[in-house]
Amino acid sequence: MPPTTPYAGKFSPSPYNNNNNLHKYHQPMEASYGDMCYHDNSLVSGSLEALIQHLVPTVDYYPDRSYVFTFLLSSRLFLHPYELMSRVCHLCVEQHRSGDLLLDKIRIRDVAPKIVQLLTEWTETFPYDFRDERMMRCLKEMSHHLARGDEYSWRAMQQMTQRLIRRLAALGQYEEAIATLNASAAERPTALKSKQQNGQRSDVLSISDDAFILAQQLTHIELDRLSFIGPEEFIQAFGVKDPLDNHKSFFRKRKTTNLEAYVAWFNRLSYLVATEICMPVKKKHRARALEFFIDVARECFNIGNFNSLMAIITGMNMSPVSRLRKTWSKVNTDKFDILEHQMDPSSNFNNYRTALRGATQRSITAHSNQEKIVIPFFSLLIKDIYFLNEGCASRLSNGHVNFEKLWDLAKQVSEFLVWRQVTCPFERDRKILQYLVTTPVFTEDELHLASYESEGPENHMEKDSRRSLRSSLLHREHR
């Protein structure tokens, strides 16, 4: 797989740790195009046109890589990536046009390597922008333009395009695989419709009774799916429309497929945990499942896999599981209480954020890939970025783009890029992986009914609920 970000060396562990140097870079030779505002030598705002011009390299100037990443990430709040690409390519061509063919060829030759560098950063960090055929057409046209002045840069463009095509092909294969897995998991075998027939269905303990091995396989799934989330999906998830744009928003079709698939995986894991606990007929088997998932959750915490940890805790706290008092009475919950404390949502998840900082610090000084693993509680990461976007205007009263906000968004997303590029060091167990992603799970109604069959209703409300659920599920089976 090609590298997911070109910033590993320059920005590791995070490109924005040094706040003093974050916004500093050389201004282009000609700074009269539009206007930009600085504070203590840091860019704080600018007109959209000036910011676009600032992205365009010249013979004597190349934008700082942190600026390139930040603007490519958040410019989509104001215009479609294709519009930005068109304007950048137009400026690259026009600013070196003199009317003298020989002079133009010399100018193109001199600036071509920097144009290739900019487009390489774009295609490697935001490859999914190029699923738009118009973006690929712009690349092709720029390649032809550079070929007139510099054969070396033309060849570099060809190699860059081939890497991009491979990355997009891998994305297509991944999305097809996820669709196939989801279809397989959606099948409702008879064994899942009734607890009494659960002998026809394997349970997780029959696949693996080693909590550490299962936590390792969950980490494989997490890192695999993280690697396909484009950084731009965090911005596109907002569905924001620029208040100065009178045209239809690019976000009317939000391009967040892989981000949504990852959130769906969290939900699936939660329901899988609840299903495994509610399915067994015997109380001792349910208690064993509870104890096992507590151990798996603890191993996930030790690995730095906070997303699987939270999904397991969420599944164990679902009402069909939490109401199984007789089952819980057979379990020593001390370890579970500690894990719940670590993921306590009070004080804006302060305990979790402390643990995340610890895991991040361990990753920075890591001597092995296992120590580098940091998988954040993903829904909270999305929430943090969402509120960062909502809590601050994208435009200032003078019409300038609020670039301080863009820096903050880039800081959050760039940390995700560092976490995303870690290679999972654990050996794959295909049987366990297949089980985790394809075995059918109960729906919410089926979970409640299975819970009532395990431990009967304790009050009139639960009795009414069981009666209603039985009737509803029976009706669905006969449709």
Image (cartoon, rainbow, N blue to C red):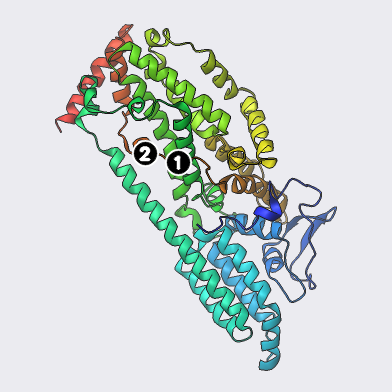
Label 1 residue SS: helix
Horizontal arrangement in the rendering, residue 317 relative to residue 114 (left or right):
left
Report the quarter where the C terminus lies.
top left
> Residue shown at 56%/35% (left/top)?
380
Residue at which label 1 appears:
221
Q: Position of residue 57 (x, y in %)?
A: 70, 71
Figure check: 30 above or below 448? below
Q: Position of residue 321 (x, y in %)?
A: 39, 18
- Mark positioned earlier in the residue sequence (2 or 1): 1
Under mark 1, the amino acid is Ile
Label 2 residue SS: helix
> Residue shown at 56%/78% (left/top)?
143
Total number of numbered discs in the rendering: 2
Q: Residue 28, labelled with which disc?
A: none
**How far apart are the alpha carbons under marks 2 and 1?**
9 Å
Figure check: 342 above or below 425? above
Q: Nearer the viewer, residue 17 or 372?
A: 372
Q: Callout 2 environment at 10 Å: few (<14), some (14 to 19), or many (20+)?
A: some
Residue at which label 2 appears:
437
Q: Nearer the viewer, residue 13 or 391?
A: 13
Horizontal arrangement in the rendering, residue 31 relative to residue 352 (left or right):
right
Under mark 2, the amino acid is Val
Q: Nearer the viewer, residue 234 or 168?
A: 168
Image marks 2 and 1: residues in contact by CB distance under 8 Å: yes
| Residue 247 visible in the picture | no
Outermost residue on the right side: it is 40
Q: Callout 1 environment at 10 Å: few (<14), some (14 to 19), or many (20+)?
A: some
Q: Position of residue 340 (x, y in %)?
A: 54, 20
> Residue shown at 62%/47% (left/top)?
418
